[in-house]
Amino acid sequence: MSVHLHWFLPTGGDGRTLVDRHAYTDGGVKRSRIAPVSGVRAPDIDYLTQIAKAAEQLGFEAVLTPTGTWCEDAWLTTVALAQHTERLKFLVAFRPGVISPVLAAQMAATYQRITRGRLLLNVVTGGDSTEQRRFGDHLDHDRRYARTDEFLSVVRGVWSGQPFDFDGEHYQVEGGLTALPPDPLPEIFFGGSSAAAGPVAARHTDVYLTWGEPPEQVKQKIDWIRGLAEKEWRTVRFGIRLHTISRDSSAEAWATANRLLDDLSPETVAAAQEALGRSESVGQQRMLALHGGSRDDLEISPNLWAGVGLVRGGAGTALVGSHSDVADRIEEYHALGVEHFVLSGYPHLEEAYWFGEGVIPNLAARGLLPRIPASPLIRPAVGGAPLLVAGGR
């Protein structure tokens, strides 16, 4: 079982701070290259292309693109970026409650043909009623998961290439059809920690995603979903969503984490915690419980730092340490059954290189990744140290 590594596209903005999007004076709606706070980067296509190309060159398999009010549209952004990359896949996040399942199936089929099979789907049911109502969705938490269950039944049904009928509480479809089904079928990623989410994952998902909790808690989730999937006569694979701060030494990595923490005022943390505390998402509440809003004892497990979650919703933990430390933790999660690692870091361009040049070779040396091909510019030297080959006079 190899490790699959994915990076993240910050379509809501990026920068050298954990509160990047909030640094826009207008909340991120209008953007320009002249940011009101030093070091904040607008998510324009040129910058996102840099990240996508870096991810591809460094050996990441795919990039996750988020969905939400403060993000650029994931479908449109990634299909544009596909024209600037060759192999990179795009893990497109979308909310099933705001789009027809038959249309989503058709969009996925078209996307696969345009990109020659580079689409992965991340289904986001939604844990914030305020955000959901912004898009016209007024269902409560559990009914949203019931709708997602129906949605994915319809999507898979119309991908069969034959007319498909469905009569449910949320969708009624007569002769639903994707005339040219996607080839290959996009893998479906899905996350949710509530009792309502588990059965949906068991019935429909290819990869169940959890946020970065300590290994023992992740193991409990894996056992839970695996047990539910067995009752459905299905096999589910597992992924984890984490940030990373990887450096040549552990001291350098923790110094970077502490700098990110020093950038956060008590008022910023308090405001973020109050807003996040209103979330209906069980996963979000589990993230908040890891630190309790306190800056103390943020290393909640070896090399697992909860500081990101003081101000950021969703994934709130980071792997922090030397390249070998971070590889150790990935190996630990992998031993539990985690195959897919969806990673990110601030800023996303620089952190992609820190991870790609430091951790990826380490994982490959352990046999967790296919061996990285040697660059044509590098040849082995006596003693194993690489030498650059002169390319000109």
Image (tube, grey):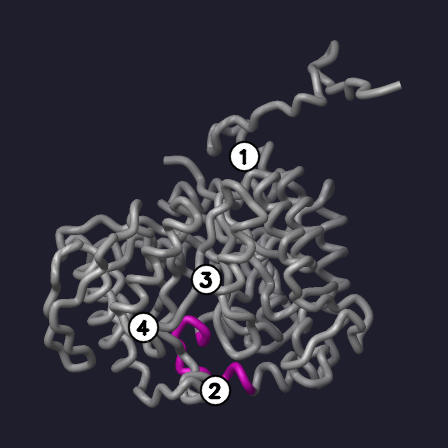
Q: Which amino acid does label 3 sit on?
A: Trp
Q: What stretch is highlighted in magenta?
A: 275-285
The answer to whether 118 appears left or right of 372 in the picture is left
The answer to whether 286 appears left or right of 16 in the picture is left
Dot 2, crowdedness within 10 Å: few (<14), some or many (≥20)? some
Residue 208 visible, this angle:
no
Whether residues under marks 4 and 2 lie with C-beta atoms below 8 angstroms apart, the answer is no
Whether residues under marks 3 and 2 lie with C-beta atoms below 8 angstroms apart, the answer is no
Nearest to N terminus: mark 3 or mark 1 = 3
Instruction: Identify residue for label 4.
Output: 194
Instruction: Identify residue for label 2.
Output: 278
The answer to whether 190 appears left or right of 77 in the picture is left
Q: What residue type is labelled 2?
A: Arg
Farthest front residue in view: 179
| Cα gap from disc 2 to disc 1, whole angstroms | 39 Å
> For residue 206: magenta?
no
Residue 375's image quarter?
A: top right
